[in-house]
Image: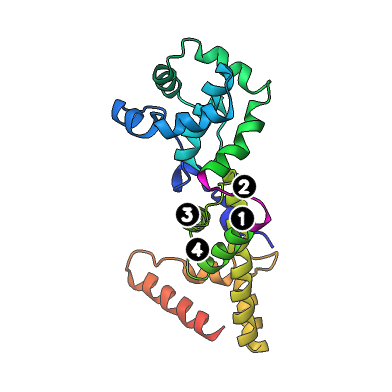
Amino acid sequence: MTDPYIIHMTAIHETAYPRIRSHLSDNELEALYTPTPDDLAFIHRSTKSPVATFGGVVLLKTFQRLGYFPSFDALPPRLIHHLATALGVLTSHVLLQEYEPRGFRRWHVPQIRAHLGITAFSDSGRRVLIGALIEAARSKDILADLINVGLEALVQARVELPAFSVLRRAAQKARMQVNRRYYQQVYDALDDRQRVTITRLLTREDSETASLWQWLKREPKQPTIKHMREHRERLILGGAT
């Protein structure tokens, strides 16, 4: 069964999924992204290489803000420049280019998680996410709202955020599962005659241009006597169907 709401593909900007704005103010850079003495002490304990030190600081400060590890290419140049200035680095672009090939990201990621008390998104995190989404889908229908509930649950559980596409698919699946249960409950509450009547309302023969449901939903035309009679007859027919 296809989720009818997938026609509108919820975009990341419609949710609370954390992102770094491309235009950061000086105050934001200073307050959110300036390395603290504790940040620097942690990085210096784990590595001595200038390449690893600068890349590690970039990874740490962005993870603290986002809850996931972004690609360096996706970061605003102004943010990279701010961190380079804070560390006295003159060749930030060159250092970041060397960071990935030399395997420093693989080295730093688990250390940063441990330092911040964050768990990688795995089976346990998925269970947290799915449980929160199923519960929320019982009372919420808008996909962005469900995604936001999932985000909050992962943050509270101190679980690293997965890719946005993972959250969106999980929210779609949870909503579909809950809706199927509601559909089944409604179906079970109807008798055979009611089911036949609803089926007839929602389907059309090959010779028909619209279903009875579409016909019943038509708005009345201008309130002339003729049009009002036609609308009255349509409502009477719908009640008798």
The mark lying in front, picked from 2 and 3, is 2
Identify the residue at horizontal 41%, vertical 66% (top origin).
Answer: 219
Residue 30's disc is none
Of the image marks 1 and 3, the number of the one nearer the N terminus: 1
Amino acid identity at mark 1:
Gly
| Quadrant holding the N terminus | bottom right
Residue corresponding to mark 3: 148
Identify the residue at horizontal 49%, vertical 52% (top origin).
Answer: 155
Image position of 140 with respect to 9: above or below: below
Report whether residue 209 is seen: no
Residue corresponding to mark 4: 141
Q: Residues within 10 Å of mark 1 (few under 14, many from 20)?
A: many
Q: Nearer the viewer, residue 78 or 120?
A: 120
Amino acid identity at mark 2:
Ala
Q: Is mark 1 on a helix, strand or loop?
A: helix
Quadrant in the rendering for residue 5: bottom right
Identify the residue at horizontal 47%, vertical 83% (top origin).
Answer: 236
Residue 120's disc is 2
Identify the residue at horizontal 57%, vertical 42% (top origin).
Answer: 113
Mark 1 and mark 4 residues within 8 Å of each other at the beta carbon: no
Q: Position of residue 27 (x, y in %)?
A: 29, 30
Q: What is the span of residues highlighted in magenta in the rendered image?
A: 116-125
Residue corresponding to mark 1: 125
Main SS category, magenta section: loop
Q: How crowded is mark 4: few (under 14 residues within 10 Å), some or many (20 or more)?
A: some
Q: Position of residue 146 (x, y in %)?
A: 50, 58
The mark lying in front, picked from 1 and 4, is 1
Q: Residues within 10 Å of mark 3 (few under 14, many from 20)?
A: some
Of the image marks 1 and 4, the number of the one nearer the N terminus: 1
